[in-house]
Image (spheres, rainbow, N blue to C red):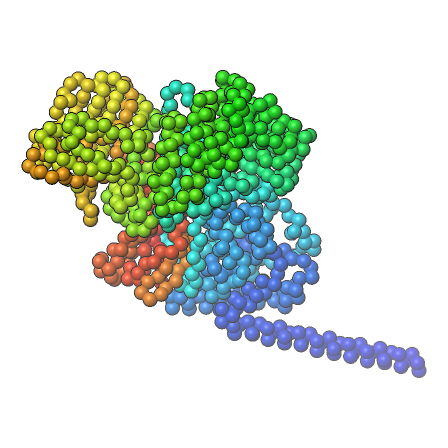
Amino acid sequence: MFEIFSIISGLIIILITAIFLIYNSKKKQVVHDKSSALFKNLSKEELLKARLDFYSRSPVLNYKNEKGLEEESTSNSPAMNVRENINNRDLQTLNKEEKNVEKNDEKKQVVYTKSSSSLKNPLKEELSKTSSEFHSRSLVFSNENEESLKEKSSSYSPTNVEENGNNEPHQKLNKKERSVEKNDNNKQQNVDNNLKKLKEFSKKSQQSNEISLRDSAKKSNINEVILKSFSSYSELPLPTIQPIKSIEEMLAWIPGYDDFCRSIAPRKKFSRKGSYAKTLVCHDMKGGYIEDRFIQGFGSDKCYRFQDWNYIDSFCYFSHNLVTIPPPCWTNAAHIHGVKSLGTFITEWQDGARACASIFSDISSVKRFAKILVEIACYYNFDGWLINIENDIIPSQVENLKKFIQILTKHLHDRIPDSEVIWYDSVLSTGQLKWQNKLCSENKVFFDLCDGIFLNYNWSIYDLQHSLFTSGEARKLDVYVGVDVFGRGCFGGGGWNSCKAMQVIREKKLSAAIFAPGWVMENHGEEEFTKNNKKFWELLAAYLYPHFLSELPFVTSFCQGYGAKVFVQGKMLQNKPWTNLSAQSFQPTFSNNLYQLGPKEGMQVDCIEFQTEEAYNGGGCLCIKGLAKPCEEQTRTVLRLFKTDIKLMESTNYSVEFTYKCSSDRVQLFLLVLLEDNPSYIVFNPSKAEIQSCSVSSTYAITNLQDSQYVFQEPLNNQTLTTNAEGIWLTRSYSFVAQKSCCLQEIRVILATGGIVDVDEKLPFKVLLGEIKVCLSNELHRSVSSAKNLQCHNLSSIRYESKQKLCFTLSWNISLSENEIFPKCFDIFCSGNITESNATLDDINFGCFIGRSYNNSYCVNELIVPLVCGTGVIITVQGVSELNTRQNYDECAQVLIKWP
C-alpha cells in the first residue's frame, strides 16, 4: 500500500513540474515577443538611442580594425544581463528598421551626421590617460583637437548618426560582439598600447567624421565636402605649441600628431669673412609661450618681435620646462636670415634631480633620451639644444651625463648639418651644482664633449681671461659669455648698459650670449617698443659682427612679421592687426646709412623707417621721407641697404625686380648693386618713359658717372603698375648677364633730384620701397608647387540670420614635380559656389582672404559666409614661392564645402 502511494505521489510531482516548466517557457516567449514588438514600433531616433544606451553601459570598447568593434568587459558587467535578452534576430530587425527610416529621410533630404561636439567616445578611460600625456604640447592631435576629443568622450548624439558605407564604427555596434575578458588589466597597459589605441581611434573618427570626400564630377581637382547637418557647431581652438613638461611626456612623444607646429623653412646660407666672435641670443620673456605660441599668428601688432638677425649667429628659445621646443615662427624667421634655432633641455630643483636620476640611471636610458631630443629637433626643424642642468647629479651618474652629451652631440651632427649643442655653466665634474662664471677644469669636461659653453652671468674680467686660457686658441670662439639684460649680478648692470659687458667680452675676443633682450618690452612697455628696441640694439651694434647672405635668390619686402593690415602685391587683403614672425622678410644690414653726392641742399632725408600703413607684400615696407629743395644742380642721396656675399657666375643670366612708390615726380629712384671687380657698379635706371614724364626730364639721368666703373641697365618693357587706394606701385624688371664670375657685395638705392628751378619752396616727398628681388632668370619661369591631396576635417556649422558660421581644418601634402619651385607658404581663399547657385554673380562672388599657412595645414575656426552663395563655398589653397611668385589660381588645390 505504501509503495503504491509513493508511486502516485511521484507522478503528481512530475506532472506539476512539467506544467510549471511549460507555463514558464510560454511566459518568457511572451516577454520576448513583446520586446521584439516594442523595438519594431520605435522610430529611428529611439532605436538608435536604445542601441547606444545599451552599448554605453559596456566598459572599454577598443577599435581593432576598420570592419568592426571588439568589446572588452568584465564578466559581471551589467550589460551582460541585457545582452541575453537581445538575440541576433532582434539586431537584424533593428538594422532593417534603420535602413527603412534612412530611405525615408533621404527622400526628405534630411541627412544626419556625426558631430564632433556630440559624439561619445567609448575610449574615455584610455583618452583621459593619453590626452594628458600627449595633448599638452598641441591643440591639434592627428587632425583632432583636444577639445573635440573631450567632447567625443562625453555623449553620443543619435540625431546626427548616419550609415555611410564602410569605415563607420558606430554603425556596426550591433555586428560584432565577442566574449568578455575575465581579467580587466586596462589600467596596467603601457604607453605604447595607449598610443596604438589612440591612433586607431583617431583614424576611425576621421573616417567617420561629419564630412565625406569624393572627386567632383563637375570640376576636376576639387574635393567635395558634404556638410550634412546644421544641428551642431563646435568652434575649433586655434593651434598652439607647448613645451614638454615631464619625462613621462618625453617618453610618450612621437612625431606626426602636431604638423601645425613644424617649421618647414630651410636655413639659408650666410657667410662672414674672417674669424669673428659669435653672438647667441637667448629669448626668455614672461615664461615663454605667450603670443608666439599661436602657430597661425596673433591678432595684435603689439607683440614682442626681433629683426636684427644679421647681428647674431644662434637664437635659443628658453623656458623653465623640461623640453622647450621653439615656436615655428621663431625658427622660420631665424632660418630666413641664416641663423640657427635652438631649443632648451633644462632640469632644476628637486623635480629636476629626480628626472636626472631617471634619465642617467643607465646607458640604455641615456641613449633613449638622447635619441628623443634628436628626433624632436629633426621633426620641428630646428638646429640644436641648450643643455641646462641646474641641480645636483648623483656622483655615480656623472659618467652617464657625459655620455648623454656626447651621444646627443654626435647624433645631432649626423642628422642636422651644422647643428650645435651648448652646455650651460652649472654642474661640475663631481656632479655638484656650482656655477663657475668661467671655463675651468671643473666644467671643461662637458665643454669638450659638445659645441660650446654658455657661461653664467656673474663673471669678472679675470674670469674672462681664465676662460680664454682654458679654451685655447682653437676653441675660444666656442665660449659664450653670458650677458643678463635684466642685470642680475652681470657686469655693467644690464639694461641700456649691456653694451659695457659686450665691450669687455669683445676685447677678450670671446663670444657672447645675450639673455632676455625682451627686457626692453617688459620694462618699457609696448607703445614705445619700436623706438626702444632700436635704441637697445644700436648701443650693441659696435660689438656685433654682421653676417651676409651668400646665396640666391635674394628677395625682400622689408616686412618685419607684423602689421596693421595684410597686403599682397599692393592690394589690401586683410584690415586688422596681426603678428606672425614667420612672415618676416629679409631685413636690411644697414640702419640709416646714407651719403649724398652733389649739393647737399638739394635733398634733405628726414627719416628712414619701417611703416605699416601700406605695403606691397606683407605687413609693411621701408619708408623714406624728406624734402627736395630748389637747386640748379643734381643731388643724389645713396642709401645703403644690404651687404651680401653672393657669387655671380660668368655668362649667366640674372633677373632684378624693384617695386616702389613715390609721392613726387621731382624724385626718381635708381637701384644700384656693388660688385667686387670692374665694372664696380650696375645701375638700374628708370625707363625713358618715366624720365620723359618728369617736369625736368633732362636732369634725371645720373650724369657725372660715365666711366668704366659703371654699367647702366634699362628696364624691360614689361613694367607692372599696381594701383590701390593710396596710389600706384611701380615694378621695374631688368635682365643682365654677368660678364665674368664675381661677387655681388652690396645693394643700394639712389634717390635723385633734378635741377628744380621752377619752384621756390621745399617739396616734401615720401618714397616707399616695396620689394627688391635678385635671382637667376630661369627661376622666374618655374611654376609654384601646389598643395597635394587637399582634405577638410572637423567641419561644423551653425546658421543665424542670413549667414552661417563654418569651422574646419585643412591639410595637404607638399611634393615637388619636375621644374617646380618649393612654396614658402600657402594663402587660403574662400569664394562662392557659383556652379550650383541660382543667385547672380554679383551676389555670390564674395572671394576673400582667410589666412596664410607656413606649413601643410590650416585651422579655420570662424568663417562667416552668406547663405546667398547657394549650396556651398570653395576653399582655395594657393602656393606662394620664396620669390613671391604665385601659383596660377585656376591650378590651385580646392575643396568644395556643400550643405543641404
Q: Estimate the x, y position of residue 22 in percent, counting from the top left.
A: 71, 76
Q: Estimate the x, y position of residue 533 in percent, counting from the top left.
A: 37, 38
Name the quadrant containing residue 842: bottom left
Camera-side residue: 238 or 94? 238
Q: Is residue 618 above or below residue 746?
A: below
Q: Estimate the x, y position of residue 197 in percent, counting from the top left.
A: 57, 49
Q: Quadrant of the C terminus?
A: bottom left
Residue 56 located left or right of residue 819: right
Q: Is residue 857 above or below residue 507?
A: below
The residue sitting at the left extreme is 758
Q: Residue at x 23, y 20 (%)?
A: 680
Residue 140 located left or right of residue 562: right
Q: Is residue 564 above or below residue 646?
A: below
Q: Estimate the x, y position of residue 815 in percent, counting from the top left.
A: 38, 37
Does residue 710 appear anywhere in the picture?
yes
Q: Residue at x 65, y 51 (%)?
A: 187
Residue 716 located left or right of residue 549: left
Q: Residue at x 49, y 69 (%)?
A: 45
Residue 896 located left or right of residue 118: left
Name the quadrant containing residue 899: bottom left
The residue sitting at the right extreme is 1
Q: Is residue 373 above or below residue 711?
A: below
